[in-house]
DNA sequence: AACACGGGGAC
DNA sequence: GTCCCAGTGTT
């Protein structure tokens, strides 16, 4: 923490008290508030990584309907799990959750570990999720510093560019004053960041800790935390084939487990080379990646899609299968599928625009 | 410390 | 258009 620590420390009990009182007075909250099942809390927190709570809500209910306990998740096929995650993004989370469930069943008798350090050994559980689960499911006074809490603490203590350990230390200082309510304090900090202590135009007038906020006192609220610059996103043109087998079925392929959209299904294809037309790329890629010859036809759809670190324009073309049995080279699997049955497979968002056009 | 990793909502 | 969200894992 910064220089005037004495002042901040002296006001900690008051800050925690008004924070908890403010939290108690609120009605809106996360769907899994009051949830007692560690498994259900765990699933919610993994889904909520880099994802808005409102987006998580429906996925969470549906996922738990499909996989009601850690045993059913551990026993599921990877494809089923990805299907339940379809559209949520960051699909590595689903794979790690699935792997971690198997680990919990195998190594922990089906019970989640109760301490943050052990939780963090499970795939997909980092410092934040470990603290969130430990506090919410097991009542441990563990810090859970997410993006909201990071902003709140940066302002409350006027921290210029705090490291992870500085933030954790600040959170621990507050937790020490929270008595038996570590989970409520963690949630209060996150809720405050989401509701009032927002990145732009924070509503300090209604903030329960405005009187002890050091950034507000010093006029540095708008500078805390410092904005992080995003690198420019490169743009790629990608040609993909909607390859028909002559019997009303289309070829789809499954991406490698690791990396972008890992384990998801897609229409086979690849990036355009310099000066190459989309149709040409489709023919070349299907020859290189699937070892089949196709005759490329009309455009099905052109889809612009933005990812966090790149932008893609998908050129999807009809194609007729001419010869060769598909062989998965870059892919891990492939299948001929009737368009009406594609909903059984998990596709990334960009592919759905193509599928919809196909179903028209 | 920097980067890869989805998708969407708010402005 | 930009920002960033109840972050994690890899290099």
Image (cartoon, coloured by chain):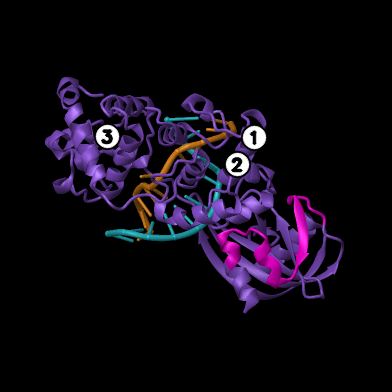
Chain colours: A purple, B cyan, C orange
Q: Which of the chains bears the disc numbered 2?
A: A
In the image, is residue A281 above or below residue A201?
below
Residue placed under numbered mark 1 in the picture: A105
Residue beneath disc 3: A154
Q: Chain of mark 3?
A: A
In this picture, which residue range is highlighted in magenta?
A: A327-352
Residue A330 x %, y %: 74, 50
Residues at circles 2 and 3 in contact by the CB criterion of under 8 Å = no
In contact (CB < 8 Å): disc 2 and disc 1: yes
Q: x, y percentage for residue A180?
A: 32, 29
In terms of sequence position, does the residue under pointer 2 or pointer 3 come before the other? 2
User: Local crowd at mark 2 within 10 Å, few (<14), some, or many (≥20)?
Assistant: many
Which numbered disc flags the more N-terminal residue, 2 or 1? Answer: 2
Q: Which residue carries the number 2 mark?
A: A70
Residue A272, position as x, y percentages in the image? 64, 59
Q: Look at the image and tell me whether residue A244 can be seen.
A: yes
Nearer to us of marks 2 and 3 is: 2
Callout 3: SS: helix
**Residue at x-position 60% and y-position 54%:** A66
Residue ID at (82%, 75%): A246
Residue drawn 60% across the image and 50% down it = A67
Which is nearer the N-term, disc 1 or disc 3?
1
């Amino acid at each position: 923490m910064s220089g005037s620590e004495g002042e901040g420390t002296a006001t900690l009990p008051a800050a925690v008290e008004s924070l908890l009182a403010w939290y108690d007075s609120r009605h809106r909250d996360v769907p899994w508030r009051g949830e007692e099942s560690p498994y259900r809390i765990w699933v919610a927190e993994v889904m909520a990584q880099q994802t808005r709570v409102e987006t998580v809500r429906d996925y969470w209910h549906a996922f738990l309907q499909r996989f009601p306990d850690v045993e059913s998740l551990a026993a599921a096929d990877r494809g089923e799990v990805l299907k339940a995650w379809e559209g949520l993004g960051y699909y590595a989370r689903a794979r790690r959750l699935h792997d971690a469930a198997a680990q919990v069943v195998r190594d922990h008798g089906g019970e989640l570990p109760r301490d943050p350090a052990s939780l963090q050994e499970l795939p997909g559980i980092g410092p934040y999720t470990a603290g969130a689960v430990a506090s919410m499911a097991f009542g441990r006074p563990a810090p859970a510093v997410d993006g909201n809490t990071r902003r709140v603490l940066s302002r409350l203590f006027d921290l210029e560019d705090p490291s992870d350990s500085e933030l954790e230390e600040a959170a621990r200082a507050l937790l020490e004053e929270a008595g038996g309510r570590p989970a409520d304090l963690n949630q209060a900090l996150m809720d405050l960041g989401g509701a009032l202590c927002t990145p732009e135009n924070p509503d300090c007038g209604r903030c329960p800790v405005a009187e002890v906020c050091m950034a507000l006192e010093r006029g540095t609220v708008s500078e805390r935390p410092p904005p992080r610059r995003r690198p420019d996103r490169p743009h790629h043109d990608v040609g993909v084939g909607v390859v028909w087998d002559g019997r009303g079925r289309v070829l789809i392929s499954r991406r490698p487990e690791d990396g972008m959209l890992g384990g998801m299904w897609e229409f086979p294809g690849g990036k355009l080379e310099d000066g190459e037309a989309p149709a040409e790329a489709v023919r070349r890629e299907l020859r290189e990646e699937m070892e089949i010859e196709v005759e490329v036809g009309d455009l099905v759809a052109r889809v612009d899609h933005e990812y966090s670190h790149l932008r893609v324009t998908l050129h999807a073309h009809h194609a007729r299968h001419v010869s060769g049995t598909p062989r998965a080279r870059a892919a891990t699997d492939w299948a001929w599928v009737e368009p009406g049955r594609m909903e059984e497979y998990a596709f990334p968002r960009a592919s759905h625009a193509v599928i919809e056009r196909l179903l028209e």
